Image: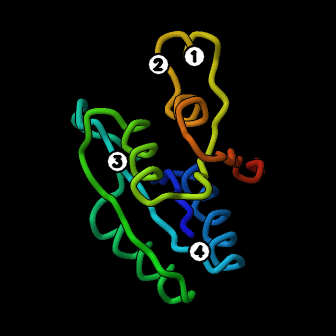
């Protein structure tokens, strides 16, 4: 059994990773962390540096989890997550979700929404804890 997590280097990705790791630990599942970018912009803040990905992997392995990481530049991020789930025969995909404005929805689309609609397995959308100001 495996669980795929669409990881981004922000609080939304951290929430997804934490939830997926908890489920993987509870179920004895292999955790597949997908951190991908289209590489179309000079800086994609959601694409983690190599050192951060290594730290994430080390932290998960230290918790006793079987972990695989896909950290790559791809043509389509949602497609990469869905493909990883298919290749891994995942029983679940976990994604972090964020609030988007109506204009943002119109102009930018949503990787999470596409994963939810295109995946062959169940998708769990999680939100990070509310920020305290």
Q: Mark 2: give few (<14), some (14-19) or many (20+) Cα within 10 Å.
A: few
* Residue at the spot of label 2: 108
Q: Nearer the viewer, mark 3 or mark 2?
A: 3
Cβ–Cβ under 8 Å for marks 2 and 1: yes
User: Where residue 11 appears, x then y in whole percent?
Assistant: 58, 52
Q: Which residue is mark 3?
A: 36
Q: Going 64% across and 36% down the picture, which residue do you hit?
A: 98
> Circle 4 — which element?
loop
Q: Which mark is first along the chain, 2 or 3? A: 3
Distance (Cα) linking label 2 and label 4: 33 Å
Name the secondary structure under disc 2: helix
Mark 2 → mark 1, Cα distance in angstroms:
6 Å
Q: Secondary structure at mark 1?
A: helix
Verify CB contact (< 8 Å) between mark 2 and mark 4: no
Q: Are marks 3 and 1 in contact (CB under 8 Å)?
A: no
Q: Quadrant of residue 52?
A: bottom left
In the picture, measured across the screen, residue 17 lies left or right of residue 72, that is right
- Can you tell which quarter of the image residue 55 is in? bottom left
The CA span between labels 3 and 4 is 22 Å
For image coordinates 48% across by 54% down, the residue present is: 7
The residue under the point 47% across, 12% down is 107
Determine which of the numbered discs, if any, sits on residue 29 in the image: 4
Identity of the residue drawn at 47% across and 19% down:
108
């Amino acid at each position: 059994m495996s669980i795929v997590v669409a990881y981004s280097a922000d609080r939304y990705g951290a929430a997804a990773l934490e939830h997926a790791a908890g489920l993987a630990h509870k179920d004895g599942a292999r955790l597949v962390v997908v951190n991908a970018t289209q590489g179309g912009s000079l800086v994609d803040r959601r694409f983690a540096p190599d050192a951060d990905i290594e730290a994430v992997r080390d932290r998960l392995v230290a918790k006793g989890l079987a972990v695989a990481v896909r950290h790559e530049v791809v043509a389509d991020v949602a497609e990469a997550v869905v493909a990883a789930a298919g290749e891994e025969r995942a029983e679940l995909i976990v994604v972090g979700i964020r609030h988007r404005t109506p204009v943002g929805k119109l102009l930018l689309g949503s990787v999470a929404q596409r994963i939810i609609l295109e995946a062959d397995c169940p998708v769990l959308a999680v939100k990070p804890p509310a920020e305290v100001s």
